[in-house]
Amino acid sequence: MGRKNKNKIDQSVFNQMGREALLKCCNILDVETTRLIKGGITCDRSNNQLRSGIRRCLSQGTFPNRIERLASFLEEEWMPSTLDASDQEEIDPAEKVMELIENVRNSFDRLSNLQMLEVLTAWVENPQDCCYEELDLISETLGFSYEEIDEEYILVLPSPSVVATKIISMSDPDFYHSVIALAGIYFATEKRNLPVISAFIRAYLTANYELRITN
């Protein structure tokens, strides 16, 4: 016979938690913290979705040791603070991801074909946080290739028009998994925070664009 769980969780406490504490609870209970949007694009679940997932897990039953760990966290580690204030008009993370795609597309639309190629080449040649298999796959998708010369592999650039045509014709999922994924490799943010990457991309592209205009 399985051991009876003696820990009783006051579920109202989750309404007082901010994101960091909610993610800790999800980690303890093994609750999904991301969700699929479309075409392989995933996003973080909102705080309210995390709360629903935690409550669903508790109502359906989970392993006693997870309940014990959760009870211990609530009693000994977590303390309410101003950072755990209830959410006000929480934005759906899926909307943030789609806004990111739109913003980056608009940034690229302001560039000439040559400027698009220059930006992507800089990202391909200077990865900051990289799995090289992923980088090679993305590079190939964008039209880049490698040629072996004197036992060294040299990056071969596609024509600017080829790059522009590929980017313009891409679906949102393809754009997300190539251009935005490449930006995530180049701008090595600690948690791959998409809004942060978006801000970096806009700043980088704007700087390059304004430099071209003034010269």
Image (cartoon, grey):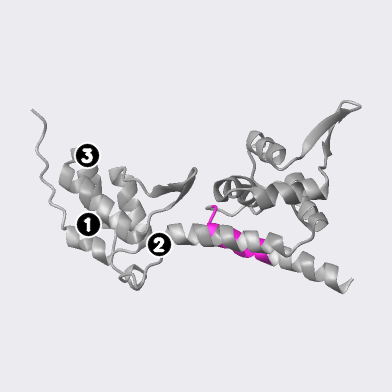
**Does dot 1 land on a helix, a strand or a loop?**
helix
**Does dot 3 land on a helix, a strand or a loop?**
helix
Image marks 3 and 2: residues in contact by CB distance under 8 Å: no
Spot occupied by residue 164 in the image (x, y as percentages of width and height): 74, 51
Q: Which amino acid type is marked by label 2? A: Asp
Q: Give the number of the disc on residue 39.
A: none
> Does residue 153 sit above or below 36 in this rendering?
above
Q: Return the residue at label 1.
A: 75
Q: Nearer the viewer, residue 35 or 171?
A: 171
Residue at figure coordinates x 31%, y 42% from the top left: 30
Q: CA distance from mark 1 to mark 3?
A: 15 Å
Q: Residues within 10 Å of mark 1 (few under 14, many from 20)?
A: few
Q: Which residues are magenta?
A: 192-202
Q: Which amino acid type is marked by label 1? A: Glu
Q: Which amino acid type is marked by label 3? A: Asn
Q: Return the residue at label 2.
A: 92
Image marks 1 and 2: residues in contact by CB distance under 8 Å: no
> Does residue 40 sit above or below 105 in this rendering?
above
Where is the N terminus found, in terms of image quarters?
top left
Q: Return the residue at label 3.
A: 65
Please identify the residue farthest to the top as the structure is shown.
Answer: 151
